[in-house]
Structures are given as structure tokens and as C-alpha cells.
Amino acid sequence: MSRTIGVVAGLVVAFAVLSVALFVRVKPMDIGVRQALLGGGGLTKHDFTTGTYWGITGVHRWNFLPRRTHFLHFCESKPVSGGDVIGSLTERGAETTRFYPPMELRTKDNNQTTIDVTVPFRIKEGEAWMIVDLGLRSSYYERVKSTVENVLRAQLSQLSSEDLQDTDKRLKRTAEVLPMLNDELAGFHVVAESLLIRRVAFPPDYEAKLQAKQLLTQQALLDGALALQAEQEQVTNSIEQQIGAAIKAKSAQWDKKLQELESEYEVTIAGIRAETMTYESRVKAEGDAEKVSLEAEGQLAIDRAQALRDQLRNEILNTRGGRIWLALEAAGNLNVPKVTLNSNDPRVPLVIDLAELAGLLVGSPAVGGAPAADGGGDG
């Protein structure tokens, strides 16, 4: 078991040693350039990007250049670590940022000036091997710095002091200089991405004059702005007065129109109210008349019904049955406070016999068949 572990460990170590000896890894922030040391192979004429490549130790030599953007600073301020020339290093040790003293030049109007400039640049895609081929791997940064100084001194010195102070003119000139700078840098296989002038400084005496001049210029601009403000205020006041007058005129027109409409609508409302009252009176009168007519018709119908009732009642009462019913009603309502009977006269009816009494009252034979009595006896 121990022997197996030892064999495996030996294989792992051997593989690691062979990997280091036979392969080279190009990291993302680098550009790899391979050169053959034996057999006259010379330099491989293309760049190696991120990845792992064949590279035998002692047979091939690898050069690594930074892929990231380089920064070339000409400025008065020093980096944190101090010194005039300081660079930030990549993992392979290549510098990508360097600081140099401000650039001095003489303007078109023969004034001495100092400018702070930053120039970001990068190695052109696919041309890193050309830098190595020219033997500039360790010196291309200084070549770029010298070229930038020469081009900027030659081109920016064509500006006057006032042109350098004017932001628009200064930006326009830097935009024109950038293509010229790249033409000069093409021989070093790098390209400047932009050109930024960060500060423009003149000698103290001239700076004081410039500040006084700037103060006068600003004061003149302020006076002009105040005059323009006064003119605009006058225009504004005039417009406000016109607007106020227009508002008053419109308000008067609308008030008049509202009054006219109110009067018109009041007349219309009065007419509607009069029509409503007329309609109400007419409908009420028609209703009252119809009510009287219907009441009269109803009363007439009631009177006719009562007359018909009396007629039918009289006709019914005029019959034998009616007379009997009347006799019964009369007998039932008869109030005899005192009755004197003659026991010797059998014709006298009993008072409690209503049928016989009804026959007596009606003058016809009783319902029970007894002969009718015609009176007799004291009542």
C-alpha cells in the first residue's frame, strides 16, 4: 500500500515538473510572445492571448507585455509613494503607469507655460511580438514618452495663451493633435486612446495679470448679463401688463356674457314657470270638472239604485208574502201595555200567537188556517 502511494506521489510530482518545464500559461492581463532559442526558429510572429501553450524550458523564451491600458502622466502632483518616475506593475512585472514632471512649452505669443497632461495608450492588437522583434520590450515606454513630449510641444505651442485658457479651443486642438500623435506612435506599435490636458499654469506675474483680466472679463460679462436682465425685466413687465389688460378685457367680456346668459335664462325660467302654473291651473280645473261630473254621475247612479231598490221593495211588499212579512214585523214591534180578554167571546185571538195576530192585522186567513178576525174586543 505504501509503495502504491509513493508511486502515485512520484507521478504527480513528475507531472507537475513536466508541466512547468513543457508548458507556459499566459494570464488574462498579459500578452505572450514566444521566441525559439534553438534551431533558428526565431520569434513566433503572432501574439499569444490567455491560455496554456507549448514552451520547453531552455528551448523557448517567453516575453510578456501588459494587455491593460498604459497611463502616461505629466503632472505636478506626486504619487503617494513619492518620486518623479513611478510605475504600477502587472503580475509579470511590466509597468503600466508612469509619472513625469509637468510639460513646459512656450505659447504662440511667447509666454512660458506649464501643462499637466495624461495620455492613456495601449499596445495594438496582434503587434506585441513586433515590439519584441524591434528590441523595444524594455524601452518602448520611454520611446512613447519622448514622442508624446515632442508632438505636444510642437503642436500645442501653436496656441496662444488665450487659446489655452479657452476650454472649447483647447479641446478642439487636442482632438486635432490626437491623430497626429498616433501617426508618430505607430512605429512603436501602440495607440493613444485620448489626450487630456488637466491643468494649464503660467508664471506668477502673468497668472496675476490673467486673473485680473479674467476678473475684468467676468465683470464685463456680469454687467452685460445685468443689462440683459434689465431689458428682459422690462420686456417681462410689458408682457405682464399686456397679459393683465387682456385678462381684464376677457373678464369683462365673460362677465357681460354671463349676465346676458343669466338674464336670458331668467326669462326662460319665468316663461317655464308661467307655463307650469297655466298647465297646473288648467289640469286642476279639468280635474275638478271631471270630479264634479263623476260625482254627479255617481250620485245619479246611487239615486237610481235607491229608487230601484224602493220600487222593488214596494213591489215585493205589495205581494201577499210582503204583506205577511210586514204584518209579522208589525206584530213583532207591537207594544200592548194592557189586554183585556173576554172569556165568553171565542173570537178574540191570543196575543202570543203571532200568526193569528198577523192574520188579524192583514185581514186574511192566518197562516195556520184559522178564520180571520175583524176586530172585536177591546184593545
Image (cartoon, rainbow, N blue to C red):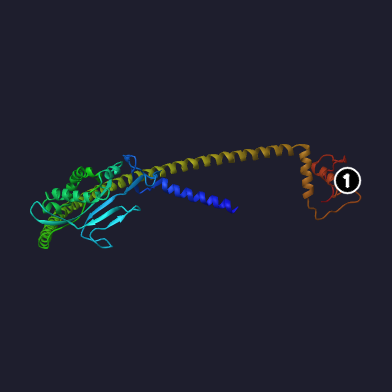
Left-right relation of 87 to 202: right
Query: Residue 102: horizontal and vertical position, in percent?
Result: 18, 57
Q: Is residue 104 left or right of residue 59?
A: left
Q: Which residue reaches farthest right? A: 344
Q: Residue furthest front?
A: 39
Badge 1: few (under 14), some or many (20 or more) residues near its Cα, within 10 Å? some
Percent x, y of residue 276: 41, 43
Measuring 62% from the left and 40% from the top, which residue is drawn there? 302
Residue at image location 24% in from the left, 58% down from the top? 85
Of residues 193 and 230, the one nearer the viewer is 193
Q: Residue at x 68, y 37 (%)?
A: 311
Residue ranking furthest to the left: 109
Viewer-closest of 252 and 217: 217
Total numbered circles:
1
Q: Quadrant of residue 362?
A: top right
The residue carrying mark 1 is 347
Residue 64 rendering spot, x and y as whole percentages: 33, 48
**345 lies left or right of 70:** right
In the visual, does 130 lie left or right of 342? left
Name the quadrant containing residue 324: top right
Residue 261, x across and y down, in percent: 30, 45
Instruction: Check disc 1 and give the amino acid type.
Output: Arg
Please state which of residues 60 and 107 is positioned toward the viewer in this rendering: 60
Assign a secondary structure to mark 1.
loop
Q: Nearer the viewer, residue 84 or 178?
A: 84
